[in-house]
Amino acid sequence: MSDGIIIALIGLCGSGLGSLIGAVISGKVWQYRIEQLEIRVEKHNNLIERVYRIEEEQTVTGEKIKVLNHRVKDLENEVKTYGLS
C-alpha cells in the first residue's frame, strides 16, 4: 500500500472515532438536560397542585366564616328579641 492510502485510512478512522465520541458525549449532555427539565416540571406540577388545594381550603374556610357570621347574627337578634343584653 502506498503511504497516501495509509494516511487516508488513519485519518478516516480518526474522524470516525472523533465523530462517535462527540455523538456519545452530546447524547449524554442532552439526556442530563432533559432529566433536569423533568425535575423542574415535576416541581412546578407539585406547586400547582398545592395551590389548587389551598384555593379549595380557602373556599371551604370562607363558607364556614359565612355560616358562623349568620349564626352570630341570629344570636344577636335573639338577644335583642328577648332583651337579654
Image (cartoon, rainbow, N blue to C red):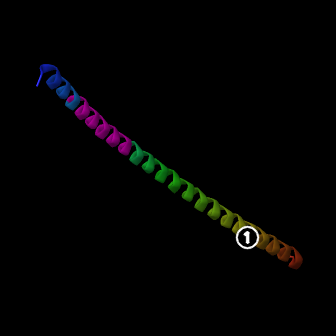
Q: Eyeballing the image, is 38 above or below 12?
A: below
Residue wearing tag 1 = 68
Q: What secondary structure do most residues of the magenta stretch adopt? A: helix
The residue under the point 47% across, 53% down is 42
Residue 9 lies in quadrant: top left
Residue 74 lies in quadrant: bottom right
Side (left or right) of 41 relative to 4 = right
Side (left or right) of 32 relative to 21 = right
The residue under the point 66% across, 65% down is 61
Side (left or right) of 35 relative to 79 = left
Q: Eyeballing the image, is 54 above or below 27?
A: below
Q: Eyeballing the image, is 74 above or below 36?
A: below
Q: Is residue 1 magenta?
A: no
Front residue of 76/35: it is 35
**Magenta residues, start to end:** 14-32
Q: Tag 1, which secondary structure?
A: helix
